[in-house]
Structure formats: structure tokens, C-alpha cells
């Protein structure tokens, strides 16, 4: 649903994407941060609970319990997928120069596709991680743009995963640097903090909420901006008129002025 000129970031660069994402995050901070807290609060509590009991389960040899807790701790990904849909709505409003409220953002999100997408992609990534760490990270990198593509192009679950891999592969290291490495580092550093400090559950839950809302949320916003840029570049290179996949159309002049507006902030 978005077609912007590939000239916005030609070539697409990590610095350009990060700069645009940060500008949008600061301009729409109240809506983005508020919805991040609302979306991630429950999942942060679940992750904190699982993290608190996982080490004990491993030390006592309760491997079935440990496996269940690992799965439970990954439920925050469902929240992240919904939040990607929220980011897409806000990025669309930003490029269209129009205000948008929190209610407007969450209304009509395609939950029926976003949730199954996260379940399937998590299973695929978990299968890769079961082989070795590297294959899991590769699979994550190739499929991480699927949720934005569900929103932008109105795709189903499997087509979105396929399209994500098609877009990400030629820009593999860019996606690694902007999405895979930051999100992996955040998760691992949080796990290390839990292991070293043994924080009380309430404090741990607050830490999880803050980490997801103030660190993961901007990263997911950057993921959406990156997807916009790669789709726009793909359409431009294919000589597409922007209607083949039902993209949201933004004229070159609007897009250029939007970049200048964001870059000046």
C-alpha cells in the first residue's frame, strides 16, 4: 500500500533509515510510546515471569518446564508484531502529513494475519535456531520484514514471508545491521541483566516494559521505515506504477518534502 520514490534514500543506507525513524519517533513520541507501553506491558510481565523461573528450571534439571518457559518468554514477539502494524499506520500518517490518534492507529489492524504470521515465523526461526544459532539468525533476517509487508501490501502470511526474503536478500547486511543485531543484542543484554542481578519480579517487569517501550519500539519503527524504502526501491527498479500490489501511493514531491521536513528536525 506504499509507493515512495527510491530517490529518498538512493542507495538505501542504515544512516538514512535510522535518521528518518528517529525523526518520526520524536515527532510522534506520545502516541508511539503510549501504545508501546499498552501493547508490551502484558507481554513484559509474561517474559519477566518466564525469565525469573527459567534459570531455576534449568539448574534443577526440569527440562520440560524449561522448554515451556522458553516458549512463553518468546510470546513478547506477538506484541512486537502488533506494534509493527501500529508503526506502519504512524509512518503512513507521517508521510501523508496528517495527524492520527491512538484509537485510529489500532482500529482495523489486520490482527487475523499479523498474529498467525508471528506464530509461523517464530516456528521457522526456532527451527533454524534448533540447527545452530547462525541459521536461526539468517532466517530471522530474511523474514523480519514480513509484518510490515502485511500492512503495506495487504499480503497473506506465506506470501509476506516470501516477499520479505525477496526484499531482504539483496540487502542482507543492511537488514542485519538495522534489525537483527540490535534486537538480538537488546534481548541478550536483558537476559544477562536478569542472570547477574536477580532482580525482584516487580522491578524486572518494569525493566522489561521500559526496554520494550524505549529500545525495541524505535527499532521496530526503523524496521518499518526500512521496509518502506526497500519496497519503494523495488517498485522503482521494476518500473512499476505503484498499483500492482495495492501500495499506498505518495507522490515524489510529497515524499521529497517529507524527507526534508524530517531531516530538519
Image (cartoon, rainbow, N blue to C red):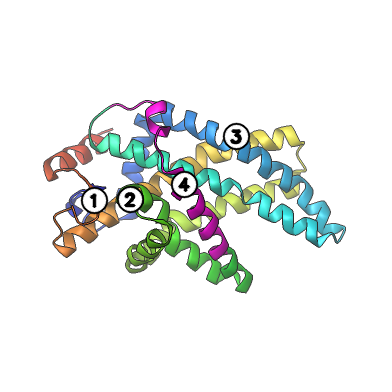
The answer for how far apart the CA atoms under marks 1 and 4 are is 19 Å
Q: Position of residue 112 (x, y in %)?
A: 46, 46
Q: Quadrant of residue 12?
A: bottom left
Residue that numbered label 3 is attached to: 41
Is 123 located above or below residue 249 in the figure?
Answer: below
Q: Are marks 3 and 4 in contact (CB under 8 Å)?
A: no
Q: Nearer the viewer, residue 242 or 195?
A: 242
- The residue carrying mark 2 is 154
Residue closer to the observer: 36 or 111: 111
Q: Is residue 145 visible?
A: no
Magenta range:
99-125
* Callout 2: SS: loop
Whether 124 is among the magenta residues is yes
State the mark number for residue 246: 1
Of 21 and 3, the residue lying toward us: 3
Contact, CB < 8 Å: mark 2 with mark 1?
A: yes
* Separation (CA) of disc 2 from disc 3: 28 Å
Taking the spot 84% from the left edge, 59% from the top edge, the residue there is: 62
Residue located at (55% from left, 70% from top): 134
Q: Are the residues at dot 4 and dot 2 in contact (C-beta closer than 8 Å)?
A: no
The alpha-carbon separation of the residues under discs 4 and 2 comes to 12 Å
Tell me the SS state at disc 3.
helix
Label 4 sits on residue: 112
Q: CA distance from mark 3 to mark 4?
A: 21 Å
Please tell me whether the stretch drawn in magenta is mainly helix, strand or loop.
helix
Q: Which residue ends up furthest to the front in the rendered image? A: 112
Amino acid at each position: 500500500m506504499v509507493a515512495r520514490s527510491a530517490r529518498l534514500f538512493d542507495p538505501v543506507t542504515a544512516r538514512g533509515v535510522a535518521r528518518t525513524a528517529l525523526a518520526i519517533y520524536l515527532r510522534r513520541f506520545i502516541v508511539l510510546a503510549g501504545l508501546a507501553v499498552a501493547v508490551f506491558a502484558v507481554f513484559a510481565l509474561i517474559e519477566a515471569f518466564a525469565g525469573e523461573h527459567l534459570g531455576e528450571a534449568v539448574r534443577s534439571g526440569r527440562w520440560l518446564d524449561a522448554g515451556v518457559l522458553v516458549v512463553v518468554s518468546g510470546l513478547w514477539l506477538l506484541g512486537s508484531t502488533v506494534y509493527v502494524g501500529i508503526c506502519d499506520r504512524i509512518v503512513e500518517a507521517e508521510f501523508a502529513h496528517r495527524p492520527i490518534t491512538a484509537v485510529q492507529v489500532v482500529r482495523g489492524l489486520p490482527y487475523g494475519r499479523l498474529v498467525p504470521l508471528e506464530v509461523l515465523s517464530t516456528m521457522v526461526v526456532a527451527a533454524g535456531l534448533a540447527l545452530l544459532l547462525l541459521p536461526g539468525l539468517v532466517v530471522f533476517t530474511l523474514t523480519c520484514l514480513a509484518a510490515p509487508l502485511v500492512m503495506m501490501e495487504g499480503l497473506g502470511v506465506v506470501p509476506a514471508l516470501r516477499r520479505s526474503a525477496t526484499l531482504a536478500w539483496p540487502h542482507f547486511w543492511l537488514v542485519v545491521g538495522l534489525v537483527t543485531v540490535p534486537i538480538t543484542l537488546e534481548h541478550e543484554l536483558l537476559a544477562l541483566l536478569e542472570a547477574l542481578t536477580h532482580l525482584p519480579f516487580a522491578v524486572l517487569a518494569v525493566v522489561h516494559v521500559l526496554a520494550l517501550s524505549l529500545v525495541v519500539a524505535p527499532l521496530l519503527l526503523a524496521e518499518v521505515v526500512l521496509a518502506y524504502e526497500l519496497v519503494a526501491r523495488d517498485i522503482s527498479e521494476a518500473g512499476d506504477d505503484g498499483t500492482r500490489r495495492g501500495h499506498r501511493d505518495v507522490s515524489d514531491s510529497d515524499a521529497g518534502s517529507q524527507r526534508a521536513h524530517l531531516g530538519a528536525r
